[in-house]
Image (spheres, grey):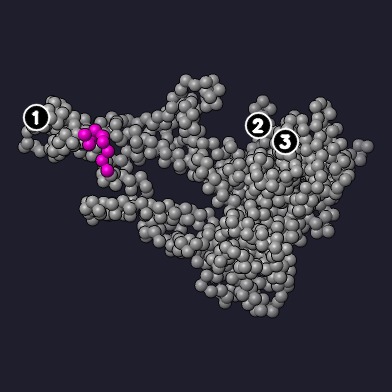
Amino acid sequence: MIAQNFIENIAHETKTEVEQVAAAIALFNKGATVPFVARYRKDVTRGLNESKLERIFERNDYFVVLTSRRDALMENIEKQGKMTDELRAAFCACEDHLTLEDVNLPFKKIRNNRAAIAANKGLLSLADYIWAQSAVSPPPVLYAESFVAVDKQVLSVEEALEGARDILAECIAMNADIRRELRDRLTTKSLLVVHPVRVDAELSKRYSSFANLKKRLEEISAETLLGLLKAERESALRLELVIDDDQIIEHIAGRFIQDKDSAYAAEIQAAVKDAYKRLLRPVIEDEVLVRERRKAEDYVISNCRDHLRSLLLTPPAGSVPVIGICSWEPKKYCFVIVDGEGTFKQSLVVEVDDDALLSAKIEEGLNSLLESESVAGIGISSGPGGREVLQIVQRLLNKTKRPAFVSLIQDNGLAAYVHSALAVEELPELDDALRATVSIARRLQDPLAELVKVDPCSLIPSRMSTGVNRKSLLAGAVQAIESIVNRVGVNLNTASVNLLRYVSGLQFGVAQVITEKRQELGKFTNRTNLQDISGIGEKTYQQCAAFLRIFDGENPLDASSIHPESYGFVDKMLKELEATLEEVRENPERLRALDLNAFGDETTGPLTLEDICYELGRLGRDARRNYRPPQNFVNIDSMDDLREQMVLEGIITNITDFGIFVNIGLEQEGLVHRSEVGRWMQNDPKRILQVGSVVKVMVLQIEQELKRIGLSIKAALKLPLTRPQARESSAPFERYRRDDRASNRFDRDSGFGDGARGASGAGRRRRDKKDLTVQKTSDAGDRKKKDEKVFLNTTLADQLASLRDKIIANRQD
């Protein structure tokens, strides 16, 4: 366990109680993972959420390394016989590596520098004499005469004084307080000035926006700072921290000079100036820039993680046959059909040399596939030409009245997957173009299961991670994937090795053993089967079991996020209610009659029991939202078709601090500024919205020349979708959805979208979850729920608008 002051530091940083931090660290020290603690040890940590636990885990690791380094340094000083109580207290007070190294600096082995050379010449006593600044002693010029010695290569008084100043400069530069103060001043008071460098035209143009920048360091955004540092590494720009050096030198000298009019003042002033310019300023400036770069990287990586989490939570279309379309090469369009399990069935390649024939060729190829196989949907790569193909496909579906939905699929990391050994292993008989198209189709069925096959860094747009250290980015991306995989859960009988490796407590090797055992058994029928696998001991089983789902197994609870250690509590609850599991699932309100305080133990208390009750009412459901493609992509073919006040639906492609980017079917994405998101989700839009979700927006502003589209979510909340002309654009899809919901094919509750009730599983608490023990209501809560209902449920209004358009069209006829 780390020191108490470190625990208090973490508690202050994460705005939690010291006892909560100590409890979480105790669990981590016993081998518990963040997902496990967040979900199944809520009562031990008193409800710490996953983001705070992640931060506690990171800071605990940092302080463990810091403590190890501190103990090693203190042990070394003990061996030198130089340890004092004051020095020990200084070491124990260090809370970061820079401060720790500052305290240790005077005890490091002396290098062969100017101070060491002067000391070897016997000038250490002269330096001590000057530093003492005795008013009754002779001036340093006279005292220095006794140090002139040819055999020691001290040929003059000036050389002796210069050597003494070198020694004093070294001592001043080693002062921990001076270093800390200078570091703080450069961070908060300095200006970052950018100087252009003579480079080739292309490199100069790339960073032209940064030229002649002059701004306070603390006011520069993380993205800009990383871009500047990258430009400096490429020798395209030169960066400099500018501050009033003379003022700092005077301030430092004032701390050491006892009498400004004494003969010693000039020598100490010169030593301070030398120490600052030669030993302090360059080193501390580098340290400040490195520290600021790491802070900027942490901020950018945090945004990348949020983006990746949102991407991985993209709603799955489910285990239904689909067509994938991808233009991997110019003028070459690949079509593939995969079945409900994602298995490749057939393909078609259309090559078009004449753009005028593009629409006809694509329609012809797609028609042939649709006639040969029955499919539920079509996924089109969002890469080059994707939006154009989307519009062609939409027109074809409307014309032929085929009951299939169509959507653009994000192609993040597609090239990385296609060229990987895994892609060759999975699809050995296909070329790169068809492998890419199969991946697009599978991403439509289950984005999470397909995206985990890709190098995590490749899933993050390069524009978001510019200048970020790849190792740090990879660690953050892996952490985000682990978080989502464990939130959604994994189907033990269908999951690939690449998905299983991210499950809490499992490593790649164990994941491989699990898949081998699955092939041997045919399928797992009970979670306890995991205990028979080599590499899964009691501790590993505890960490991973609840995140692995078994559908249609021996125990219905194995399809839930309820931990096996809590199955006994479920039995007690059912016995108390005199009900079966199926009865409780059909009527979860019965659970409200339970007094949860009567159940549980030291690790399973009311918070965990509340989660159990909630899960009993939704066994086997997917934690991700229901899939629904936009209804109006076909309504607009270019920015010329847009009009202000139009209400459209689009897909969220990115969520940033300043707004949300939405694809409304054009090459140019629209931007919903933060102020136009809506009051009820303005503070934290990422809590409600996610990449891949369908959102209704109103067109506020159109700037043709700049290719900018301004959108609003809050203005579109209560309005129906705009129908520019009378036609049945969304009728085929709406009829298909209605018919299939009646037959439970598209009903998430009955297993749509997850193979055998979830290709990736289930297990996340909904944000609108009601308390199972105390029902709370408020006017603010009612307003929020009303707004959410209006935002998420627009089907009725859209159907009425469609009916109105048809009536108008009939009258015109």
Q: Residues within 10 Å of mark 2 (few under 14, many from 20)?
A: some
624 in relation to 388, above or below: below
Question: Is any part of residue 208 visible from this angle?
Answer: yes
Magenta stretch containing residue 226, yes or no?
A: no
| Picture coordinates of residue 771, whole percent (x, y) | 61, 65
How far apart marks 3 and 2 lie (CA) works out to: 28 Å
Q: Which residue is denoted by mark 2 in the rendering?
A: 708
Q: Earlier in the sequence, mark 1 or mark 3?
A: 1
744 in relation to 385, above or below: below
Magenta stretch containing residue 110, yes or no?
A: yes
**What kind of element bears circle 2?**
strand
Amino acid tagged 1: Glu
How far apart marks 1 and 3 lie (CA) works out to: 82 Å
**What kind of element bears circle 1?**
helix
Amino acid tagged 3: Trp
| Picture coordinates of residue 378, whole percent (x, y) | 78, 44
Question: Is any part of residue 641 visible from this angle?
Answer: no
Point 55% across, 51% down: residue: 479
Point 44% across, 55% down: residue: 60
Amino acid tagged 2: Arg
Q: Which residue is denoted by mark 3 in the rendering?
A: 328
**Numbered-mark total:** 3
Quarter of the figure that contains the N terminus: bottom left
Q: Which residues are magenta?
A: 109-117
Label number found at residue 145: 1
| Picture coordinates of residue 603, whole percent (x, y) | 52, 70
Point 47% across, 31% down: residue: 233
